[in-house]
Image: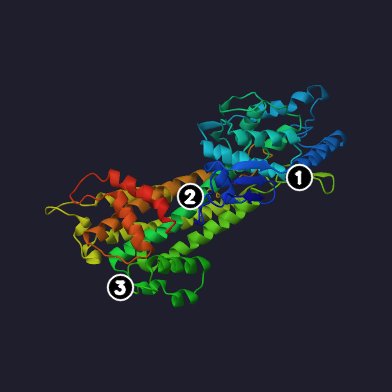
């Protein structure tokens, strides 16, 4: 995978996306999660490597030759419980289209354009690895569609973690000209009898959703360092909990990373502070120990994604090296499902601390400010309602954090007797991320309001600059008023805080 960047236009931050001048060459071996996000959200152009076309051609010829000699699942046979049904020679030409039509039963809301674009990019990259046996024209068509911005309609519901059959069948039928394009379009292509299962034998749609969620959550976790730092300043926290010596004594990588981030954002080396208390509440004192597992979980998720978006995982696998066809179980996504369950469980712990810090911020004994950070006549409610909002979001996150990997399914007349429910885990993760964003927005609003009411003068460190930017964007109002607008503005600030 090669990336060409216009250096004059490229951003400087770790997550800055170069402009649409960025070109990503897809060859099946080195596509990164960040590249998928660039393609999906920044309209990075995609160039299909010529050697990928050659690999696809070789695999297609092996698959066709092997199918003439013996049964090959889905190519010369039916699928699922119909695996032992040999396709009649008289109906072989229509076999592929029949498979696509019968499997394109997705329902629910259509996927977002960015999710569909990410799905197409991932599937193209997987096909470029050369293990599917699809005709090279399928790769060229996908590449062309991405190049001109053509998108099929792909529905959200219809997979259980053993292949995104419905979603990819919808893409396949659109490429074949049987389904209309939702945006733009390219000329239809011929679907060979062996192309259909080879094309839909992938979890690319779920991988697309998870890759976008991975990016969003990683940004949120970075932003949470800044939000927590602002709460730390508003509450007069003790820096001892973030000391390098403390975390060297128990060096879990995530905790060490979190503590270092807090020292940097707060500028503790250059501007040492002393706390108001001998020991802070857990929301401040145990933050590295709770945030750390979430940072490790998101890194582990990226490692799983990096393998799967570059995997020739089609069943059957066409081995160009040996000229052999292998039937296998790579459709299972247990690794990804378990990684997502871990992420949501870790995020729930992090979110609980955000709720506790909000509780501290409305408590006069912790801030030295009026109850609920109110400013007005006696009995004013201030930001009291934020606790309701944040605990509503926390409850939603708690339900979303329930593990999906404890369930299974037995389908196709008992032949397919296990499912990872990774697709459902992806949906739950998106719900959890949205809920956590709301919670961080509430905490940010409270922390900024507390610093504003205290007329805090912060040093020129990342937290100080973040406070100034958040204060100006949120546009605080002192007397009791409807907080909906301020919560919404705080939410828009959250993603920018990841860059401080």
Which residue is found at the position 45% from the left and 62% from the top? 291
- The CA span between labels 3 and 1 is 61 Å
Nearer mark to the viewer, of 3 and 1: 1
Which residue is found at the position 66% from the left and 50% from the top? 2
Q: How many numbered discs, if any? A: 3
| Residue situated in front as seen by the camera: 258 or 365 | 258
The location of residue 246, given as percent across then percent down, is 44, 76
Could you classify mark 3 by the number of other residues whose Cα lies within 10 Å: few (under 14), some (14-19), or many (20 or more)? some
- The CA span between labels 1 and 2 is 33 Å
| Residue situated in front as seen by the camera: 413 or 450 | 450
- Which quadrant would the C terminus be assigned to in this image? bottom left
The residue carrying mark 1 is 51
Visible residue check, residue 167: yes
**Which mark is first along the chain, 2 or 3?**
2
Residue 191 numbered mark, or none? none
Which residue is found at the position 31% from the left and 57% from the top? 468
SS for dot 2: helix
The location of residue 166, given as percent across then percent down, is 61, 33
SS for dot 3: loop
């Amino acid at each position: 995978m090669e990336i060409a960047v216009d250096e004059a236009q490229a951003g400087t931050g770790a997550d800055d996306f170069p402009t649409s001048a960025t070109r990503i060459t897809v060859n099946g071996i080195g596509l990164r999660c960040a590249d998928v996000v660039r393609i999906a959200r920044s309209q990075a152009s995609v160039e299909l490597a010529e050697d990928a076309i050659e690999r696809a051609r070789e695999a297609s010829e092996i698959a066709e030759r092997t199918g003439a000699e013996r049964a090959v699942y889905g190519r010369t046979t039916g699928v699922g419980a119909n695996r032992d049904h040999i396709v009649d020679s008289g109906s072989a030409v229509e076999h592929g289209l029949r498979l696509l039509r019968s499997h394109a039963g997705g329902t629910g809301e259509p996927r977002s354009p960015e999710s569909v674009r990410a799905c197409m990019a991932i599937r193209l990259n997987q096909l470029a690895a050369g293990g599917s046996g699809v005709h090279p024209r399928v790769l060229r068509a996908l590449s062309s569609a991405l190049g001109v911005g053509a998108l099929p309609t792909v529905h959200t519901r219809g997979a259980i973690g053993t292949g995104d059959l419905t979603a990819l069948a919808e893409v396949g039928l659109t490429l074949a000209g049987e389904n209309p394009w939702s945006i733009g379009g390219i000329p239809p292509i011929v679907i060979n009898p062996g192309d259909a299962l080879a094309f839909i034998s992938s979890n690319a749609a779920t991988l697309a959703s998870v890759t976008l969620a991975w990016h969003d959550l990683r940004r949120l976790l970075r932003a949470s360092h800044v939000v927590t730092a602002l709460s730390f300043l508003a509450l007069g926290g003790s820096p001892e909990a973030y000391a390098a010596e403390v975390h060297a004594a128990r060096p879990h990588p995530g905790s060490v990373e979190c503590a270092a981030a807090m020292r940097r954002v707060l500028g503790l080396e250059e501007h040492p502070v002393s706390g108001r208390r001998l020991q802070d509440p857990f929301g401040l004192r145990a933050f590295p120990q709770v945030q750390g597992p979430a940072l490790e979980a998101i890194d582990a998720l990226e490692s799983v994604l990096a393998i799967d978006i570059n995997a020739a995982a089609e069943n059957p696998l066409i081995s160009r090296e040996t000229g052999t066809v292998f039937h296998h179980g790579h459709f299972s996504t247990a690794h990804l499902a378990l990684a997502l369950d871990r992420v949501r469980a870790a995020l729930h712990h992090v979110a609980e601390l955000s709720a506790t810090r909000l509780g501290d911020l409305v408590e006069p004994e912790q801030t030295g400010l009026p109850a609920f950070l109110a400013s007005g006549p006696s009995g004013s409610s201030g930001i009291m309602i934020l606790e309701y909002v944040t605990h509503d979001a926390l409850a939603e996150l708690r339900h979303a954090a329930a593990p999906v990997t404890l369930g299974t399914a037995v389908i196709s007349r008992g032949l397919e007797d296990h499912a990872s429910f990774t697709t459902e885990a992806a949906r739950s993760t998106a719900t959890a991320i949205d809920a956590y964003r709301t919670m961080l927005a509430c905490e940010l609003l409270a922390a900024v309001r507390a610093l504003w009411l205290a007329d805090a003068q912060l040093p020129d460190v990342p937290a100080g600059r973040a406070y100034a930017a958040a204060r100006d964007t949120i546009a605080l109002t002192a007397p009791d008023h409807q907080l909906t607008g301020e919560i919404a503005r705080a939410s828009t600030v959250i993603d920018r805080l990841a860059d401080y």
